[in-house]
Every structure is written in C-alpha cells, then in structure tokens.
Amino acid sequence: MTTDASMLLRTPVDPSVLSSPDWWLYQLELSLLRKRPDLQVLADYATGQAPLMDIAESVRTAYANFQRRARTNFAGLAVDVMLDRTHVAAIRTGADGDGLGDQMAWDIWQANQLDADSNALHRSCFEMGEAFAIVGDVDPDIGAPLITIEDPRQIAIARDPMRRRQIRTALKTFTDEWTGWDHAYLYMRGESGGPAYVLRAERSRSFGAGGWHWLGEPQALPFGQVPVVWFPNQLDIDGITYWGEFEQHTDVLDRINSTVLQRLVTGAMQAFRQRMLKGLPVHDANGAEIDYDGMFAADPAALWQVPAGVEMWESQITDMTPMLMAARDDIKDFAAVTRTPLPALSPDAANQSAQGSEIVWSGHISKVIDRMSALSESWEQVTRLAFLWLGDEARASRRDMEVLWTPPDIPSMSERFDAASKAKAAGVPQSYIMANIVGMTPQEMRRYADEMAATAVESAGPAASVTATTQDPPQDPSAGGEQDPGSGDPMPGMGDPGHGDGGMGMVAIRDDSPFTPTPLQVGQYHALEQLVEAAGKFDQTTGGNGAHYVDPSPFAAEGMACGNCYFFEGPRGCEIVEGDIDPQAVCKLWIIPAELLSQGGTT
Ligand code: SF4
C-alpha cells in the first residue's frame, strides 16, 4: 500500500495502482454510490415518504395526491418504539475499582452530547441498518476527543476479512451546500504496526466516482487503527449483510399503503355518486344536438325538469368494511414480523388480553436487548478510540469494557421498589438491586451514596446521643407485632426513620462494645456503613475503592489495629473491607475507641 506523502500534494487521483490510496478512494466511492439509493429508500419509508405505486401516465397526477395521503408512517413508529427503550446509562472501563476510568469515559460521552446524538445514531441503525461514528483528537472547545455521529449515506468502509468489525479503510464524503464542492476524507489503517493515516481530497462538484484531487499531505494518527466505528444492525452471519428494522418487510408496508389508498379512492368516488338519465332526447325540436353540459347542476337547491318517460339511475354505495379489515390484518402482520407491540401501531389493540400483551412485549424487549448488545460492541470501540487519542493505552486496550443501558422494560417505580424489597429480603446485594432492579445509573448510585453519607453525618451531629445501642432498627411501638423481614426498605435511609431503614434519626454503633464512641465516630461509622451498603465493600488496595489495608499495622503497639476497630468482625473479617482481615493489620478507615488507643488493649 502506498502512503508516500510526496505523491499526494494536490495531485489528481489515479486509481490504477491496486490498494493505493487513490485506488481505495475510487473503490469506496463506487461502493458509496451503489449503496446510497437503497439507504435513501429506507430513510424515505421511515419518514413517511414511502415510494408511490407505479400507475398509468394518464392518471398519475390525479392519483399522486391520493397516494401521498394513503401513506401512513408505520415504519417510523416501529423505529420510534425501539428508540424509546434504547438509552445508554453509563460506560464501565472494565477494571474493578476503576472509578476514575468510568468517570472519564462518561465525561467524554457528556462532552460530546451523546445522550442526544446517540439517539440519532441508533435511529439511523434501526432505519437504514447502519450508522457510523468518527473519533477525533481532543477538541479544545469540549476538552475531550471529538466524537461525531455519521450518516451512512456519506460513509463507505472496507472491513478486515478476518475481523469483520475492524475497518481497514474508510471514506467519508460530503458536499458543501454553499460552494458545491465535494470533500473526502480517506482513513487508512496502519500496516505492520505503523500509524494510521487520514488523507483529504476535494473536487469542484459531484459527478459520480472520480474527479478528485488530493489536498496536502497524509496526516499520521498516533495509533494504527482507523478512527471510524461501524454500527451495523442485525448483522448477518456473512459479516457483510445488515438490515434495518423494517427493511425485510417493506412489502407489508406497501400492502398497507395500497389498501388504504383503495379505501380513500373508493370513499372519494362514493362521495360523488354516478347518476344517469335514460331516455333523454338527443336533438331539440329544430334538429340541433342538445348540449346537456351544465344543464343538471349538482346543487342541493337545483330542480331538474325532465321530459315524461325519462328514467333516473344512481350508483350504489360499496361496502368498504372488507378493505378496512384487510388494512388491519396487514398492520397486524407488520407488527408480528417486526416484533413491534401492536398498540404502538394501532391504539385499538390496547385492549388485548394480559397474557397476549405480555407475550408481545417480552418478544419486543428481547429484540431490544439483542440490538443493545450489538450496539454495545461499537460504543466500546468508540470509547477505546477516545482513550487512544488521550494516550491512555491501558484503558484503550481493555477487552472487558461494558456499556450499561437503562432497563428496556421500564416498569413503574412502584413495581421496581416492590421487586427491590423482595430482592433485598432474598439477600441480593444492595449494589445489584440499585443497578439492575431500581435501574440507577452509576452516576445516580454515586450521588445516592454521597447523599446517604452526608445525611448520616448530619444525623449524628454533636447533640446526638452516642450511647451504644442495638444495631437492629427499633420497632415502631405504634405498629405492633413483628417486623416483616422481607419488608426492609430496599433503599436504606430513604424510608421512614424507625421503620426498618436503619434510619436517619437513629444513632447507633455496636452493642458488643463496652466503649463510648465520640459523636464524630458515630457519624463516621454510620456514613461508612451506609456507603458500603449502597456501593459495596472497599477492597484492600490503594486504588480508588481501596481501604489501604496494611498487614501488620505499623502502629499496632499503640492500639491502632483491626482487632480494636468497631468494624472488625472476628475472627478474620471486616464489615466494610473485603477479604481476609488480620486482627493485627489496619486500614485508613479505622474507627477505634479512644480508650483502646490510649491503653493499647483489645476489644
Ligand atoms: S481497621 Fe477497621 S475498617 Fe480497616 S480493615 Fe481493620 S477492621 Fe476493617
């Protein structure tokens, strides 16, 4: 492959050398010109501009108006109902405890306003079967690598035959609508460990493949990958074919439009029923031909006088019920083949049985989850490229990156909290409940944990009683009876104090300690306890989620050891730090009675 810069300074493109940049520009533009009309047809369907039926030239104009009115945008509805359930909630960079990496990935996402733009990308995938994103260098305006969402009608790619999601060469073209100039960016991956390149070309106006001139020198990228990411929808096993959500069902859409058209035409014709007068004379008394045009006005107040013996006839109304039923059947077919819930297409269907509705919705949700997993692969690639631009090769090379989505089944809040209570009673970890049942994003979980910690410190203010009490929440004397273990608040601290929430009004530490903690220690204890309940235990490392556990404690002789800590759970455990805990070790989160620090004894 030739990437010799000196060959490319405003020189005409010569596609004769196989695999040269010139050759790729020519080939990819041909590929783009070939696929663009098909993509445009799908985009037209999705925007309610489905192609009109071919019809005889003589009635084409008259029919065109009817046909336009007959097009109902079911394709757009099928896509919208998918988009309603496809929202990225967060990106995990993979490493346990890499909170900073997760936050960086999310900051990049937010800086590029991808909450909104990802929706446009997903729409393109569902409508046209594919979309693209280009990841660029750090943009000073947003302080992050620039990620642009790309229209598949402007991009063509050549994939790696072995790893089909990897792009070897990509072309983006667009026309400046003011100058009429065509612009092209050709991206070529690095060979043999070398850098990737981007080359620019332009031509005076669009006239099919060819006519390009290179502009300037190829620009080497700081890595070897093409910074273009492909988002295919419903990728086939051949790795090449992909499908928009309704692409395989445009015949059904045409059928629906055709039936609606027939109904419109029939209805319009029946509004002007045909009438006939039988037995009217053709000539008047002078033998001249009688001109009946305008003689029988279709006016409600008109009075027609006709010769004796003339008979009148009027055409009959056609029953349009079969046409209506046929259209409804076609809509049902479309809902079934696209796994779109029928109520989304036809409000009449909202009254179907609960069982039938559940089957339909579960099929739809399965489809959404399937599409999410494909989209995740591409968003992970986007994130890796962004880290590459930042020079963070460690995070860019992680293969266990994960895109988190908001739950696609969107149950009501009361359903979620009900399920959360049951999960808590069954012993499901709090962090799992918050993420997967309540549907909190990592950002919301962090905010929640911060608020819980702040509330706990506040509630344990200087005036609070610090007498050691039981760890179990007090029973509400007015409630009577035993507390249901399964009714524990799934979101501790958000419930009513004194009603099983370990509540904000309660100031307690341990009942197995003879020592009296200080008010600050009480606040610290509850803050950490609730933080861990919300976000999981600290690990023993010095990382972001680490407790900086040191074994043995360098200050054990002064009583600063796990065995003296309020969190210690003998023989070798800790309430807030995971793993094996030695009584002679210590970590930065210790809370130790002042008496033990001064005496050096053990609890
Ligand atoms: S010092 Fe306390 S909090 Fe830290 S590991 Fe030991 S017991 Fe746990």
Image (cartoon, rainbow, N blue to C red):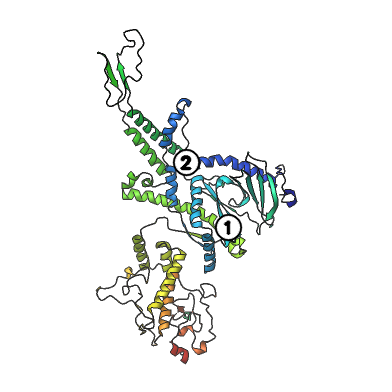
Comparing 312 with 425, the one in front is 312
Tell me if 49 is positioned left or right of 171 in this view: left
Q: Mark 2 highlights which residue?
A: 45
- Labelled disc at residue 146: 1
- Labelled disc at residue 113: none
Q: Residue at x 29, y 72 (%)?
A: 483
Q: Answer yes or no: disc 2 within 8 Å of ligand 1.
A: no
Residue reaching furthest to the right: 6
Q: Residue at x 53, y 87 (%)?
A: 555
Q: How many neighbours does mark 1 have within 10 angstroms: few (below 14), some (14-19), or many (20 or more)?
A: many
Tell me if 22 is positioned left or right of 57 in this view: right
Percent from the top left, x then y, of residue 14? 71, 43
Instruction: Point out the frontmost of discs 1 and 2.
Output: 1
Amino acid type, callout 2: Tyr
Residue reaching furthest to the front: 286
Q: Quadrant of the C terminus?
A: bottom left
Asked if one can make out residue 14 in the rendered structure from this viewpoint, the answer is yes
